Image (cartoon, rainbow, N blue to C red):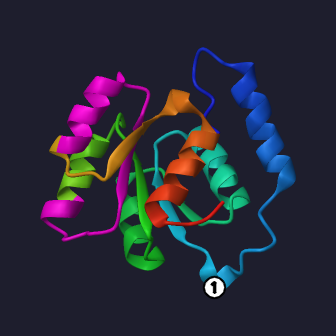
Amino acid sequence: MFVDKPLIFRDLFNTLRMLAEGPSPSRQAAERKAILVFDDSPFALALTRAALESAGFTVAIAGDLTSFESQCAAFNPDLILVDVQMPEAFGDDVALTLRRWRGVEIPILLVSSLDPNELARRAQRAQASGYICKGAGMSELVRRCRELLEVAP
């Protein structure tokens, strides 16, 4: 449910449809996987949260390093999504720090509108579990999260 520039109306309508459908009632709260989303854009955070919650995930968001640190400690996520281009730190540096210095073993996905080849290179260097291009849309983001967390649609 990213709305990337230039705006693609198909993605916007798919996002609105997913929001209108709401979360899947079949998933019990205790079974829900937790995802922490780190992005400096309030708009991207809101859309990502809405898409993931509608897909049945529990979601926490962080817009800066301070809130990211506190959410990591308090939320205990099963997956972390990190935007690459942020003013305080590059997301790939955050991912590498989590892996090397914090011993974080859960999946970490880099998210960006960078060229896919550049994003793949950064994800590999950061020891991330993978990456997703923002232009792929929210349906693809949800699909990748389900795949990494082994959650059925």
Callout 1: SS: helix
Looking at the image, residue 147 lies above or below residue 16: below
Q: Residue at x 60, y 47 (%)?
A: 48
Q: In which quadrant will I find the C terminus?
A: bottom right
The picture places residue 46, in percent across and down from the top left corner, at: 65, 47
The picture places residue 152, in percent across and down from the top left corner, at: 61, 64
Q: In which quadrant will I find the N terminus?
A: top right
Of 41 and 80, nearer the camera is: 80
How many numbered marks does the figure carry? 1
Taking the magenta stretch, the answer to whether it contains residue 113 is: yes
The magenta segment is: 98-124
Q: Residue at x 68, y 65 (%)?
A: 56
Taking the magenta stretch, the answer to whether it contains residue 88 is: no
Q: Which residue is mark 1?
A: 30
Residue 84 falls left or right of residue 10: left
Instruction: Specify whether residue 11 is in view.
Output: yes
Residue 76 falls left or right of residue 89: right
Residue 53 falls left or right of residue 40: right
Q: Residue at x 44, y 59 (%)?
A: 148
The picture places residue 98, in percent across and down from the top left corner, at: 23, 62
Q: Residue at x 63, y 29 (%)?
A: 3
The picture places residue 32, in percent across and down from the top left corner, at: 61, 75
Looking at the image, residue 96 lies above or below residue 43: below
Looking at the image, residue 72 lies above or below residue 4: below
